[in-house]
């Protein structure tokens, strides 16, 4: 029984991870990797058939190579229906669906899903925050769900 629980936990953790799609260099660094813009894909763990693509800056150089660099607080998001939309459980009206560290300790990139019940639409917001001071930089996208698939909302 313990082994099944561990396998399920690992599968859930793996499904919430980013999948690297590609990157482009933005500035040459003589030592260490170049500064880049990276594009990652995230599958919504509670909504089948929806994927989010996030582009963000990634700092290179020596600090970037050893994981000490702090990435910029700028990101862009585009979420799309990539298959039949399936929702197996009621969703909260607002929920963080992904979070990734973008500095050694204090900064995180976050993606929040919101449900627009009136329009039967899933709204995704990306932003970054810090322990002390977050950033107003953000990006939003929406995925309209076909009317025949009502979005169940947790009360």
Image (spheres, grey):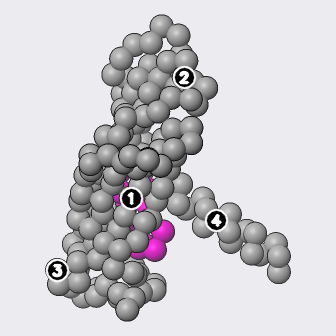
Magenta-drawn segment: 42-55
Residue denoted by label 2:
63
Q: Residues under labels 2 and 1: Cα distance?
A: 25 Å
Residue denoted by label 1:
111
- Crowd tier of the residue under label 2, counting other residues whose Cα lies within 10 Å: few below 14, some 14–19, many 20 or above: some
Name which residue lies at 47% across and 49% down: 131
Name which residue lies at 43% across and 66% down: 96
- In reply to whether residue 53 is colored magenta, the answer given is yes
- Crowd tier of the residue under label 3, counting other residues whose Cα lies within 10 Å: few below 14, some 14–19, many 20 or above: few
Which is the main secondary structure of the residues drawn in magenta? strand
Q: x, y (%) of residue 132? A: 44, 47
Residue denoted by label 3:
119
Above-or-below relation of 112 to 108: below
Within the image, what quadrant is residue 73 found in? top left
Q: Residues under labels 2 and 4: Cα distance?
A: 32 Å
Residue denoted by label 4:
11
């Amino acid at each position: 029984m313990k082994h099944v629980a561990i396998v399920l936990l690992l599968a859930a953790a793996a499904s919430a991870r980013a999948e690297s799609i590609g990157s482009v260099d933005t500035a040459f660094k003589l030592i260490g990797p170049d500064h880049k813009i990276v594009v990652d894909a995230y599958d919504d763990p509670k909504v089948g058939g929806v994927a989010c693509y996030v582009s963000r800056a990634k700092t290179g150089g020596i600090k970037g190579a050893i994981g000490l660099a702090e990435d910029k607080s700028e990101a862009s998001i585009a979420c799309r229906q990539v298959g039949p939309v399936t929702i197996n459980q009621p969703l909260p009206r607002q929920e963080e669906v992904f979070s990734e560290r973008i500095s050694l300790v204090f900064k995180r990139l976050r993606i929040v899903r919101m449900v627009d019940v009136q329009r039967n639409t899933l709204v995704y917001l990306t932003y970054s925050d810090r322990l002390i001071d977050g950033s107003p930089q953000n990006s939003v996208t929406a995925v309209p769900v076909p009317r025949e698939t009502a979005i169940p909302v947790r009360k």
